[in-house]
Amino acid sequence: MLQDIERKVLRIIYNYSTIRRRPPTIDVISVKTGRDRGGVMTVLEVLAREKYIEWNRSNPDHMVVIEGWERKDEVRWRGR
């Protein structure tokens, strides 16, 4: 399950890439989230590790969305 900031960054990348046909820069994500550059890079590492995006720290402004929404858990609460 993604944390709020991770979900927010994923949506920013997805929406920005869809509208502008290119991914946002680290600086754009930083402005939109209020996080510093290092904090944004940490969030991107989590999203890449969880396979939501393709991203590499050596080329930080290049990212590709694999899944634009958070995955649903396989085990669901049944309301009992």
Image (cartoon, rainbow, N blue to C red):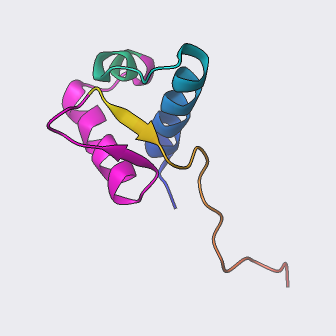
Q: Vertical placement of 66 versus 75: above or below?
A: above
How many discs mark residues in the rendered view? 0
- Report the quarter where the C terminus lies: bottom right
**Residue 59 pos. (x, y %):** 19, 32
Residue 74 as seen in the image, left or right of residue 40 = right
Q: Residue furthest bottom?
A: 80
**Residue 21 pos. (x, y %):** 52, 19
**Residue 67 pos. (x, y %):** 55, 49
Q: Which residues are magenta?
A: 32-60
- Please tell me in which quadrant of the rendered image residue 61 appears: top left
Q: Vertical placement of 72 versus 16: above or below?
A: below
Q: Residue furthest left?
A: 58
Foreground residue, 73 or 19? 19
Foreground residue, 34 or 18? 18
Q: Residue at x 37, y 16 (%)?
A: 28
**Residue 20 pos. (x, y %):** 54, 14
Asked whether 46 falls inside the magenta stretch, the response is yes
Q: Residue at x 59, y 24 (%)?
A: 18
Q: Vertical placement of 73 versus 50: above or below?
A: below
- Please tell me in which quadrant of the rendered image residue 63 appears: top left
Q: Residue at x 18, y 40 (%)?
A: 57
Asked whether 42 falls inside the magenta stretch, the response is yes
Q: Residue furthest right?
A: 80
Q: Residue at x 35, y 51 (%)?
A: 48
